[in-house]
Image: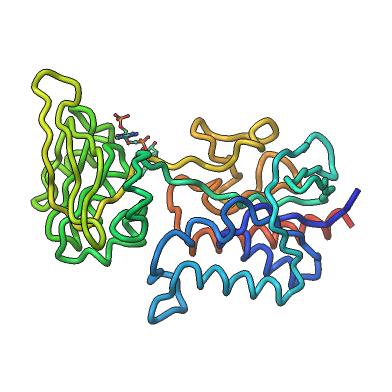
Amino acid sequence: MEKVKCIIIGSGPAGYTAAIYTGRANLNPVLLEGLQPGGQLTTTSEVENFPGYPEGVNGQVMMDDLRAQAERFGVDIRPSVAEKVDFSTRPYKIWADDGTCIEAETVIISTGATARYLGLDDEKKYAGMGVSACATCDGFFYRKKVVAVVGGGDTACEEAIYLASLARQVYLLVRKPYLRASQIMQKRVLEHPKIKVLFEHNATGLFGENGVEGVHLVKRQGETNEQRYDLPIDGFFLAIGHKPNSDIFRPWLETDEMGYIKVIDGGPRTSLPGVYAAGDVADPRYRQAIVAAGSGCKAALEVEKFLNEQG
Ligand code: NDP
């Protein structure tokens, strides 16, 4: 069986940063790219808030750059997906979908999270053309425009408030007659002059020639007084939660009730020695590329320290 000092699972900013650091430290890491090589950033258009790119950078280009930087330090990047792990004893075992099994002294989990979508065909049709699941990433493109945010939790409220600082008008589409968000966030949203909360509203589709120009809405869906109408908007933002990609690790690691891997003191250490979690898979709060990259760096430094201590 193949034996390695360090395996990195996932290829977003956290995984590649961990790869650059461990590669540079001569640990000969293996990185499994996963289902979506490059991670969530490959689905956004322009990244303008990652330091070092004064003109902004295309998300895919940035991830290609990170990959090239990891390759420069000899990282063994494989186009495979980790399917199963056994963390019962060290070295830890990781099975990939290409049929291989790797034994690793240390593991960095950087499998990210996946934004939840409503499941409408139009969300795919208008991906990158008016549909987004990240206000911080894409809000800037909607200055003085009209946008809708779907969701009634804290994320939706935060995104609506953020977007209201840029857009001309923000509609918050809430499927229930009340918000789920904390009281303080509810108050901010309900009192915000630029945010209009549309309770008991569901989006059923989008329309537009060259990008989103509006959303088909149903008010009180299924009730006798159901109403259907179209609302003109320029941007459609999903904020109905994220799902951390932690399923295969849950039998072995502590996670919170949503599945985010629990880390110690906000660093990358998990409940198992030599297993680290970096990026969105352990971060329900910030979910930013720069934060993920930072935590990937920390995980790599922990790996180096751990291996040194083990001799
Ligand atoms: P939540 O699970 O709290 O909220 C999801 C929202 O999306 C709910 O309003 C839910 O509606 C709605 N929703 C889900 N599916 C659909 C659907 N198919 N159609 C329409 N609406 C849908 O997720 P969040 O991401 O908002 O928050 C996750 C956690 O992170 C929470 O614990 C939150 O408090 C926390 N958080 C804290 C922040 C802070 O403290 N500053 C900031 C952001 C998040 P319904 O209510 O009907 O189920």
The answer to whether residue 268 is visible is no
Q: Residue 51 location, x and y as percent?
A: 45, 74
- State whether residue 99 is above or below residue 257: below
The answer to whether residue 217 is visible is yes
Q: Please tell me which residue is depicted at 69% across the width and 62% down the height of the picture.
A: 301
Applied colour scheme: rainbow
Q: Please tell me which residue is depicted at 43% across the width and 46% down the height of the picture.
A: 115
Q: Most extreme residue toward the top, as rendered? A: 224
- State whether residue 55 is above or below residue 16: below
Horizontal placement of 199 versus 285: left or right?
Answer: left
Q: Residue 72 location, x and y as percent?
A: 71, 77
Q: Most extreme residue toward the bottom, as rendered? A: 54
Q: Please tell me which residue is depicted at 38% across the width and 50% down the height of the picture.
A: 124
On the image, which quarter does residue 157 sit in? top left
- State whether residue 151 is above or below residue 26: above
Horizontal placement of 230 versus 298: left or right?
Answer: left
Horizontal placement of 157 versus 271: left or right?
Answer: left
Q: Residue 250 location, x and y as percent?
A: 64, 33
- Find ligand 1 in the image and state its quadrant: top left
Horizontal placement of 25 versus 15: left or right?
Answer: right
Q: Most extreme residue toward the front, as rendered? A: 209
Count up the numbered dots.
0
Q: Residue 271 location, x and y as percent?
A: 68, 39
The C terminus, quarter of image: bottom right
Q: Please tell me which residue is depicted at 56% across the width and 42% down the height of the picture.
A: 245
